[in-house]
Amino acid sequence: MNTVVNRPLRTPPWLPRLAAVAAAILLWWVLTDLVAGPGSLLREFGPQHVPGAAAQLFDRGVLLPDIAVSMWRLLVGLLIAVTVGVPLGLLLGLHAATEHAVAPVVQFLRMISPLSWAPIAVALFGIGNQPVIFLVAAASVWPIVLNTTAGVRAIDPGLLLVARSFGASRREQLSAVVLPAIRGQVQTGFRVALGIAWVVLVPAEMLGVRSGLGYQILNARDQLAYDQVMAVIVVIGIIGYVLDSLSRMVLDRR
């Protein structure tokens, strides 16, 4: 006699996330349509207006160019942060005396909000891409510096002793021992820096530039097109989520 075993049905991994997104959109609609009064401005920010407003921005030919220029500023700012942050982190991690000496300066600078530098950035670079890129780099450099330094400090000293015993030069120790050992920490710092850079980018693009997603929010607000304001905010959130997911996927494979 054959015995039939009833196996429990497995929930698809994407289903809980889809349910959470649906619940968030439902709550959003309730707050902006049911809770808000009939004449409330809050109704303009409802989720039902977002698709049409995004379509209007796309038809006007501004949405994709603004996304492109924002991504370009983000990329350049991150490249500057990596170029500065990794060598500085290596210096602080490999030389304890240097780290001890500059620790007050590093802690002082990293605790200042990047947007606090906005007036100085505009005064130095004027209106345009440069102050935005500067603020993105200033915001994203510190996670890279701190994670690189922590990674160097976590290296087993025995590995460096073995390398020295084989006559490895400082450059060879750096390339063969230090850099491979800190790769995970540097990747974590880069992912954190990416999130911070994306958050800072949008308000930085409200400093007089004439393009980018931050500018488009101000432009839509000035036109009293609050549905377009909400559409741009949704686009910013989606792009940020995609960037974080891609960085996690790429870095975890290495």
Image: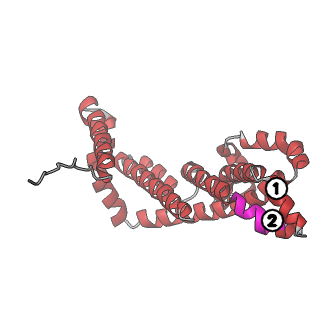
Q: Tell me if mark 1 has few (under 14), some (14-19) or many (20+) residues whose alpha carbon lies within 10 angstroms of its own.
A: few
Please state which amino acid type lies under the numbered disc 1: Gly
The span shown in magenta is: 173-182
Q: Describe residue 31's horizontal placement relative to residue 161 as left or right.
A: left
Vertical order, 180 against 218 (above or below): below
| Residue located farthest toward the left when viewing the structure as drawn | 1
Residue at position x 77%, y 53% in the image: 156
Q: State the image coordinates of residue 186 (x, y, percent, origin top left).
A: 67, 57
Instruction: Say which of 36 and 108 sits in front.
Output: 108
- Farthest front residue? 1
Which residue carries the number 2 mark? 174
CB atoms of marks 1 and 2 within 8 Å: no
SS state under label 2: helix
Q: Residue 16: in sight, yes or no?
A: yes
Q: Does 43 lie within the magenta span? A: no
Task: Sort mark 2 into few (<14), some (14-19) or many (20+) by Cα contacts within 10 Å.
Answer: some
Percent x, y for residue 24?
A: 32, 41
Is 125 displayed left or right of 167 in the figure? Answer: left
Question: Between marks 1 and 2, how big is the CA–CA gap?
Answer: 14 Å
